[in-house]
Image (tube, rainbow, N blue to C red):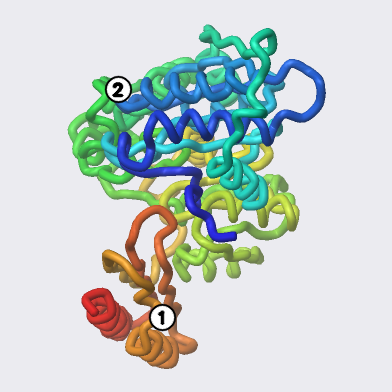
Amino acid sequence: MSRKYFGTDGIRGRANGLITPELALKVGQAAGLVFHRGDHRHRVVIGKDTRLSGYMIEYAMVAGFTSVGMDVLLLGPMPTPAVAMLTKSMRADLGVMISASHNLFEDNGIKLFGPQGFKLSDDVEKQIEQLLDEPIDRRLAQSASLGRARRIDGVHDRYIEFAKRTLPRELSLDGLRVVIDCAHGAAYKVVPEALWELGADVIAIGVEPDGFNINKECGSTSPEALAKKVREMRADIGIALDGDADRVILVDERGHVVDGDQLLAVIAQSWKEDGRLAKPGIVATVMSNLGLERFLEGQGLGMVRTPVGDRYVLEQMLTQGYNLGGEPSGHIILSDYATTGDGFVAALQVLAVVQKLRRPVSEVCHRFDPLPQILKNVRYRSGKPLDHAEVKSAILDGESRLNGHGRLLVRSSGTEPVIRVMGEGDDRVLVEEVVDQIVNALGHAAAA
């Protein structure tokens, strides 16, 4: 069965376009029925980021869940990893995060977590999808069995304590001047406070959400504002989260961006030295730079690659027993602590290395020179451009030219009608030629 609603990270789309109150209500009902297991009083926790449409979707989902007999605990604006953590710690049957992650405010989305705080498997998502298109009137709760809803206080403190406990108790951030950019998103309260409690000199930006400015020229997808602030304040480090704080990008004291691949290298080497790696290696996606793979080989560590999406990284980690994985976009999963990507906890691990080595972030976070990597997107309206003969021929020719000297990846986006073409290798000119040849072929196919 093809997936109609769920993409690589839940259901995502334009608010009041794809993501309507009607759909949100149905998702609440369908997910509630799928997770109605046993005779106990069922419970769901719902968090959200700071988008204007969050109110609309939140209350529609409350109606859906309560109509099938589930009690609802409303967390308000909270990071995605906090919702995953609270789903498990509050012994809920299901967790919901209302967010479109790094997208601008016009979009929104629905992410679902099972009772252990993990994102749902493809099979469970298919069960929910099937119910979305079926009449469920006969399965609604009886009047006396309807659910209740209430807001929960104190959840910010719970996440702050959880995050702080991922560091050794004796470790302090005293002496570090940190600029934190919360993207006007879900972490705007908890993360600056947690950094302050850990002893850092904190300068916070992106902490004035108005419903419209989430991720707008700020956060991990637009780190220019953070880099400027780091240089202006002569800070030691800058931390940029995205709208729901499940990914992180750092900026060193010179204002240079540090991506997820470098963060994985820092944490992997540190954890290896401390004997904390569960296995001698990490899990990354097909998008991670070949330079990272070569660096890890030099450290005696392996790298398992997965499709794009932190859920696939986590699946491999759990299946093969790794405790570190992530993506260049800054989704870093530390399974000793969290069941999903946690931008803040990943940043804390890097800060711990900075404090341990007492060296500038520009030195600590430069573990390898990335190979030239070219990424281009081709938008299309309809059809399947990848099935076009000219496109297939261009891809085969590109793979042949890069053989042994680089990598080529051509894939459809899981969230929008876009084909992503990525090439990397030792010879930048060759990589550009290969990528451009495929992009041109895709352009012809998309226009056909």
For the question of whether residue 216 can be seen, the reply is yes
Residue 410 sits above or below residue 399 on the image: above
- Residue 347 screen position, x and y as percent: 47, 37
The residues tagged by marks 2 and 1 sit, at their Cα atoms, a distance apart of: 45 Å
Q: Secondary structure at mark 2?
A: loop
Q: Which residue occupies the foreground of this view, 120 or 32?
A: 32
Q: Quadrant of residue 92?
A: top right
**Label 2 belongs to which residue?**
207
* Residue in the picture at 35% in, 22% down: 202
Q: Secondary structure at mark 1?
A: helix
Residue 277 sits above or below residue 346 on the image: below
Label 1 Cα neighbours within 10 Å, binned few <14 / some 14-19 / many ≥20? few
For the question of whether residue 273 can be seen, the reply is no
**Label 1 belongs to which residue?**
387
- Residue 432 screen position, x and y as percent: 27, 79
The amino acid sitting under disc 2 is: Val
